[in-house]
Image: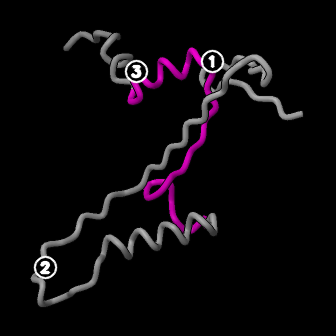
Amino acid sequence: MIRYCCDLCKRELDPEQDLRYVVKMEVYAAFDPMMVEEADDDRDHLQEIQEILERLEDAESDQIGEDVYQQMRFDLCSDCHKKFVRNPLGQETARAFNFSEN
């Protein structure tokens, strides 16, 4: 039997009673196309980058550092899911500290 717990509050989730939410995050470096005259190059650079990322995702290669690509997966309980959906980037938490401006 597989046991799950909430990755945020660490509460164990009972598969028969608790609803479990899965959050998948993908973070990758944005490669903006350089300003090039159309006559110089007709290649679709964004498409090429997307194809490279897909191949690397399938191969789970260690050749790309975490500063270029990361993929994460989290299990959340119902309460933590509600909190996450309301504030997915954690902005409210950071503002709650009210640090002085020394």
The stretch drawn in magenta includes residue 26: no
Mark 3 is on which residue type? Arg
Q: Which residue is mark 2?
A: 36
Place of residue 46 in the rendered image (x, y in percent of width and height, measured from the top left): 32, 70
The residue segment tinted magenta is 61-89
In the picture, the quarter occupied by the N terminus is top right
Of the residues tagged 3 and 1, which is closer to the observer?
3
Amino acid, disc 1? Cys
Which residue is at the front of the view, 40 or 22?
Answer: 22
- How far apart marks 3 and 1 lie (CA) works out to 16 Å
Q: Residue at point 42% right, 55% down?
A: 28
Q: Residue at x 29, y 78 (%)?
A: 44
- Left or right, 32 with respect to 24, comes to left
* The image quarter in which residue 23 lies: top right
Circle on res. 66: none
Which residue is identified by label 3? 86
Amino acid bearing label 2: Val
- Dot placed on the residue nearer the N-terminal end, 1 or 2: 1
As drawn, which residue projects farthest toward the right?
1
Query: Element type at marker 1?
Result: loop
**Dot 2: what SS?**
loop
Query: Residue at 47% of width from left, 18% of height from top?
Result: 83
- The residue that mark 1 highlights is 9
Instruction: State the image coordinates of residue 11 (x, y, percent, origin top left).
Output: 70, 17
